[in-house]
Amino acid sequence: MTTATPLTNNTELSVNVTTKSQEQILYQSSGAIIAAIVVGVIIIFTVVLLILKTYNRRMRVRRELEPKASKLAVPPPVGHNSHSLAQQPSVTFIPVDIHLQS
């Protein structure tokens, strides 16, 4: 006489194996998605840095090549008060929170 093994144990075991493999697939795919996002962010960051570097280089070259605006380009004022008009008035700012001792 041979005894038959119950089918419920085999079915539960195969369901557990299938569920675990589906979970593993989900974990692996989520890991792949996260890795793709990280790689994408690194690529975008690198492209932005390269664009800023080339822009900075172009602006520096443009500043170096353009003629410098000299102070002689502005005509001096004519008249007897020309010297006093050329000087800028100075303003002294004293912050409110500083208390002077009397």
Image (tube, rainbow, N blue to C red):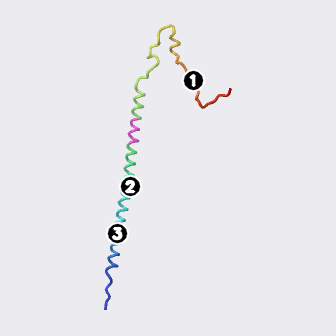
**Label 3 crowding class (10 Å Cα cut-off): few <14, some 14-19, many 20+?**
few
Q: Secondary structure at mark 3?
A: helix
First to last magenta residue range: 48-55
Residue 85: image x %, image y %? 51, 14
In-front residue for pair 86/9: 9
Q: Specify the quadrant that holds the N terminus.
A: bottom left
Q: What residue is rendered at 52% in x and 18% in y?
A: 88
Residue wearing tag 1 = 92
Q: Residues within 10 Å of mark 1 (few under 14, many from 20)?
A: few
Judging by the rendered image, the residue that carries numbered circle 2 is 35
Q: Is residue 17 magenta?
A: no
Relative height, residue 22 to residue 13 (above, below):
above
Above or below — where is 17 with respect to 38? below
Tell me the quarter of the image containing the C terminus. top right
Which kind of residue does numbered mark 3 sit on? Thr
Q: Nearer the viewer, residue 40 or 62?
A: 40
Asked if 61 appears above or below 38 in the picture, the reply is above
Name the residue at 40% across, 38% down. 52
Front residue of 92 and 56: 92
Marks 1 and 2, the one that precedes in the sequence: 2
Residue 62, given in percent of the width and then of the height, sits at: 39, 29
Residue 19's disc is 3
Q: Position of residue 59 (x, y in %)?
A: 40, 32
